[in-house]
Amino acid sequence: MASSSFQAPRGTSDILPEDQPYWSYVWGTAASVAASFGYERIDTPIFEETALFSRGVGEETEVVEKQMYSFDDLGGDSITLKPDGTAPVCRAYIQRGMHNQPQPVRLFYQGPYFRYERPQAGRFRQFHQFGVEAIGDASAQVDAEVIELGWSWLASLGLTGLSLSINSIGDGVCRPGHLAKLVEYFSEREDGLCSDHKGRYRSNPLRVLDCKKAPCVSVSGGAPRSVDDLCDDCSDHWDELRRTLDLLVGEGALSGYEENARLVRGLDYYNRTVFEYEPAERKGQSTIGGGGRYDPLIEILGGPPTPGIGFAIGMERVLLNLKAQGVSVPGGPVIDIVCVHIGDAAHDRMLALASGLRATGRTVIVAPMGRGMRSQMRYANSKGARYALILGERDLENGVATLRSLKTDDDQTEVSLDPAVIAEASR
Ligand SMILES: [Zn+2]
Ligand SMILES: [Zn+2]
């Protein structure tokens, strides 16, 4: 290949026609499962004011420090391609006065997100997520509902062997005491931490719990657990969450869950409930998606104090797992009829017939011009068409065409040049 030819930017991909059935299937299932829980679709812009993310995701997070696609537009405003779905949805909630609607407001979204990361299996710089947010209700029942929704979607896609991890990381009342305990614990074991976190655990010790490197995993195994340091309110919330999840497990809506004291999630705005869905095979990426409660976020973004919870699940990771598990998806569009024409007059008549047939709901392609009949028939077969509609010069004089089945040998009928008749004959 010539060195001057263009390539898609690193970390992006083309979703080719042969992959579209997978995408239609996962998007379509996401929308119908979300709707069945009463969630309504919202779309926010691809880019937002940069400050929305630096404030709403957290200045000291890896996302804001290292991964954002930010630039000054021609008017001099700093713009960022959205790295995350929650902050834009919360911005819309505030800006559009959704606190005046019945609470919680239940929303879902799907689309592309952008992070400058090192590409690997299931990780892209332009990636796609399905996410939901339930805003305006602090009760643990809503947490359980959101967790169940994500689970239902993944299960209804046909994925098996999934697992669910949950944790409570406390709130502004109990977390400072817990973080102090963690810092003390790590300071006594600093030599055992990975090179990234030695000397750097003080500002955010939760990052050590989130670290996937062996030294940090081993040291944090014995670290103080946030669930042991919860204040009374957080403790009640945690108990109520587990009671509700147990109920769902009993009804078969969830297959079970694990409590994971190391689960903290990477973004600063989470409080109380955090959760993750893990695939059967943890190749490349350990999680398929997750989320948590973000009660402080709307106030941080300038709105009235409003609790919220949501999740985001990575489409590429879901697709990776669907393919690995050999889940079959409904196929793409089928071509019903390829119009084969001999002579210019027949071609022109075919254009009108094809329009009429499409109006009846048939999928129709007119074979390329300037080819003989044999070549047009090969074309029809290569498109996997169900029928060829053949119109020659003499047929045109007689007002008839031949409809030949390409799926059954020697099965052909003469039809009049009437779209309704042809549509009926090609059922
Ligand atoms: Zn580490
Ligand atoms: Zn608390």
Image: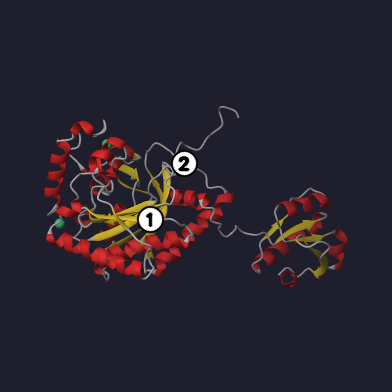
Horizontal side of residue 325 vs 218, given as left or right: right
Where residue 320 appears, as percent x and y from the top left, is 48, 48
Give the position of the N terminus as an image quadrant.
Answer: top right
Residue 351 drawn at (x, y percent): 72, 59
What is the secondary structure assignment of the residue under circle 1?
A: strand
Query: How many labels were placed on the picture?
Result: 2
Q: Amino acid at mark 1?
A: Ser
> Is residue 387 shown above or below 214?
below
* Lateral position of residue 330 relative to residue 407, left or right: left
Q: Is residue 113 depicted above or below 190 in this figure? A: below
Q: Which residue is mark 2?
A: 12
Q: Residue at x 13, y 44 (%)?
A: 181
Residue 98 in view, yes or no: no
134 relative position to 153: left or right: left
Q: Which residue is identified by label 1?
A: 163
Q: Earlier in the sequence, mark 1 or mark 2?
A: 2
Name the mark nearer the viewer: 1 or 2: 1
183 to the left or right of 48: left
**Mark 2 closeness class: few <14, some 14–19, many ≥20 residues within 10 Å:** some
Front one among 154 and 69: 154
Judge by depth and name the residue closer to the eye, 211 or 309: 211
Residue at 26% from the left image edge and 49% from the top image edge = 264
Q: Please tell me whether mark 2 sits on a helix, a strand or a loop.
A: loop
If the image is split into quadrants, where does the C terminus sit?
Answer: bottom right
